[in-house]
Image: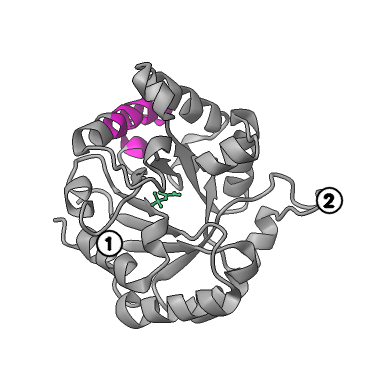
Amino acid sequence: MLRKKLIAGNWKMNKTPADGAALVAELVATVGKQTDVDVVVCPPFTALDAVAKVLDGSTVKLGAQNLHPEASGAFTGEVSAPMLRALFTTHAIIGHSERRSLFGETDAFINQKVLAALKNQLKPILCVGESLAEREAGTTLKVVQTQLEAGLQGVSKEQAAALVVAYEPVWAIGTGKVATTDQAQEVHAFIRGLLVKLFAEPVAQRVRILYGGSMKPANAPELLAQKDIDGGLIGGASLEARSFVELIRAAAAIK
Ligand code: PEP
């Protein structure tokens, strides 16, 4: 297989350091040595340190849910990429739809974050996706193209190899409504085509494109079997070891 599957858990604003450490202790005990699938957990900032300590020596990687583009300075309440690196973070979710809609993040700001992540050797998980109104208006591909191209401005071919893209239809996040495999694969293939135009074929073929939006053990096998679906960004089902492990196993079962 050209691209190893990647299963990333987005815990959002859930779990204290103790709760997070307990959850990853279960993950480490069950899937902490496997190498068939890349696994990343993204706790809230406050739990990163406790979770990093439990993950040490396992194959499970640590991600942040956000970062600020500047390295330091007068940005009250923010956390920078070098600070995250110092906590052994390797990935960062950037441009999640909740950041876009609830915190007013623009494509230009998201682009600065992507560049800051790459500059600091953090792998960005850049989220793109349309709202229900945009899907119903037939503008899904246009919306995704704008978000992707704007988010990746100034990213070099060399840097793009570290990139992960997550296609997350906003109407499917936390709603229990999952995109059909055809709907998801269509957008994933479209994103792959855009990546080919931006970075040429060899790099574009290496970039993992995750699906996110109510992915659960029951619907994951079919989604993960699609040609351009290289894993999942998982919200709700990542908050419990059992369902998250089932998703990892579902990804491992795809040959
Ligand atoms: C997400 O927030 O990235 C997500 C996909 O959430 P859920 O799995 O709960 O829909």
Which residue shows up at 60% across the image and 34% down it? 111
Judged by its main secondary structure, the magenta piece is: helix
Quarter-wise, where is residue 190 in the image? top left
Q: Look at the image and give the residue range highlighted in magenta.
A: 187-204
Using a 10 Å C-alpha cutoff, classify the residue at mark 2 as few (fewer than 14 neighbours), some (14 to 19) or many (20 or more). few
Q: Distance between the residues labelled 1 and 2?
A: 39 Å
Left or right: 183, with 118 as reference point: left
Percent from the top left, x then y, of residue 40? 43, 62
The foreground one among 222 and 255 is 222
Which residue shows up at 41% across the image and 44% down it? 173
Query: Extreme right residue here?
Result: 74
230 in magenta:
no
Residue 56 against residue 149 in the figure, above or below: below
Quickly name the residue at label 1: 247
- Disc nearer the start of the sequence (1/2): 2
Quickly name the residue at label 2: 73
Which residue shows up at 66% across the image and 67% down it? 86
Query: Extreme left residue here?
Result: 255
Left or right: 78, with 131 as reference point: right
Which residue shows up at 29% across the image and 73% down it? 34
Residue 155 against residue 134 in the figure, above or below: below
Whether disc 1's CB lies below 8 Å from ligand 1 is answered no
Whether residue 87 can be seen here:
no
